[in-house]
Image (tube, coloured by chain):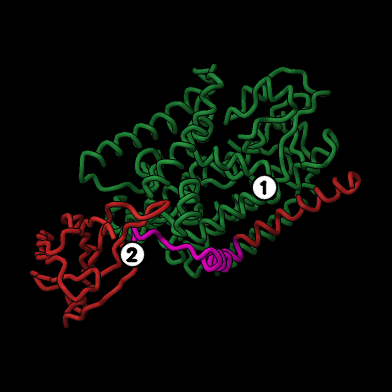
Chain colours: A red, B green
Amino acid sequence: MSRLKAPMAYVWALMAVPIVLATFIGMNFWARKLVSFTKLKVSPWCTGGDITSVVDRGTYETHVHRPVFGGLFGPRARGFVQVTLKAGDGSLPASISEEIDFNGDDSSDFRIDLDTETNEASLESHNDRVIGLGEVLAPGKDRVIRVTLRRDAN
Amino acid sequence: MARVSDDDKGHSRSLVKAILLTLPMLLLTGFMLSGVGLPQERMQQVALTITYVFINGMFFLMMYTRRTNRYRSTLFVVYSLCFVISFISNLVETRGSMVLSHEDMVQGDTPFCHMVIPMVIIPAAFTRTIIFPGSMLEGFAAIGTMLVLWLGASIALGRAWCSWGCFYGGLDEGFSCIAKKPIIKNISKKWTYLPFAILLVIVLTSAASLSPTYCGWLCPFKAVTEFEEISSSTVLLQTIIFFSLFIGLVIILPILTKRRTQCGLFCPIGAFQSFTNKLNIFDVRIDPEKCSKCNLCSKVCPTFSVDSESIDAGKPRITCTKCGKCVDSCPKEAVSFHIKGTPIGLSHERARLLFVYPAFLFLSIMASGMVFGALERISLLVTTGSMIR
């Protein structure tokens, strides 16, 4: 075995050039394989989470995302729900008032009033899990609103 | 910076041998550069030719003089400078400024960089998510492609990534080359443990907060890439911290110490990358029979990886980035590149060649895109007065 050690080491050293070439030539291929194998996704704390419902308002769409609470070992006490107002071909209306049902019980959990020109928003809560308005962001023609939530004890 | 000195001539091999050894690199870099398609515009063709000649010129000099570090260092510094020029120009062109807004983050438009990798591992293992506001596969510097790049580099080169691949390392290396002699000479060994302490802190705080804390608070290279819009006193404080770290660790201390202080005394990804040296086949060895204990290797090591203890042990510390500076500077040729599992002291040049080919190939592929991009921007500046299209 000790006599084989040095030749094996040289073979392994020689493999470094093909490894470098394979890394660069197949970068996109390996990246897709890595992502599909590990099933990794970007954290919902960054993306806002999966979309659970889409309401078509004619000139724009309201996307309600799944509430985000996920922590390292389990859900956190506080999280948020993201509402994305997606502009269609034109821009969003100057003011928008939306009743949002984030838990799918067919009743409104909060109302958002948004001035899309100044990006000033106000929130009216109908659910005691709703704590307050988080961020209002304006990526391009769309608007993203994050509302801070308390986790349901149940 | 890269001229053949009388000292080098003493080690140089024949011109024909050097050309023959350069041929594989000429073919490989030519293949990699032409893989993305040859440009149609004359200015781009000139930029590509300069890039190709410059990169292979460095490799030829490495082969001819049998010196590794000087030419690696030249290309490495140019690569980092070109990265900064290309990256900032691209950002200003696509976003209008270097400012990263919350909107960019929500849209997943933040380029991923290797600095984030230690912080994403624990959350990825527990939540199957990457705590970074980028894109997994789409766009520039997607998370998946950067992870593959880092994995490939780690398997092939170990921590040599820090001297042959990292697009930031050349900045403090460049500043460390400015002064003729170091003004600060004695740095306590205790400081070399700081990157490991920072690594531990950022890994734990990132896992607890599910956000990359190093990017938010400490990364000095935000000063030359992108940074968050100052919209609160917290962001203002973060901005003051990272600018101070950049000025202190990447500019002032490297000039004063002639060492890569950011890489050797601060960088947590460098500390993390050190562990890949354990798995990698290439290392550096000090032959105790040839060593005269002059400590020159210890004095010149840019990342504080060689000290009297490591000289006695016959190898640098785990933090060695395989830059080759100690190998080149040893007057007794006691320090050499080595392949684990092979006898020490035999066939130095064989081991050096086996390491330098993949390492230089990695650096040349990374650098070629940046050098080409920067030359394109500079030519744009000369012809139109602006680097932005």
Q: Name the residue nearer the viewer: B114 or B19.
A: B114
- Label 1 vs label 2: CA separation? 48 Å
**Residue placed at 55% from the left, 51% from the top?**
B367
Q: Amino acid at mark 1?
A: Phe
Q: Is residue A121 above or below residue B181?
A: below
The image shows residue B61 at horizontal and vertical percentages of: 68, 43
Which label was assigned to residue A49? 2
Toward the front, the furthest residue is A154
In the picture, the quarter occupied by the C terminus of chain B is: bottom left
Say which residue label 1 marks: B59
Which chain is mark 2 on? A
- Element marked by disc 2: loop
Which chain is mark 1 on? B
Badge 1 local density, few (<14 within 10 Å), some, or many (20+)?
many
Q: Is residue B38 visible?
A: no
In the picture, the quarter occupied by the N terminus of chain B is: top right
- Element marked by disc 1: helix
Q: Is residue A14 visible?
A: yes
Answer with left or right where residue B119 lies relative to residue A34: left
The region drawn magenta spans A24-47
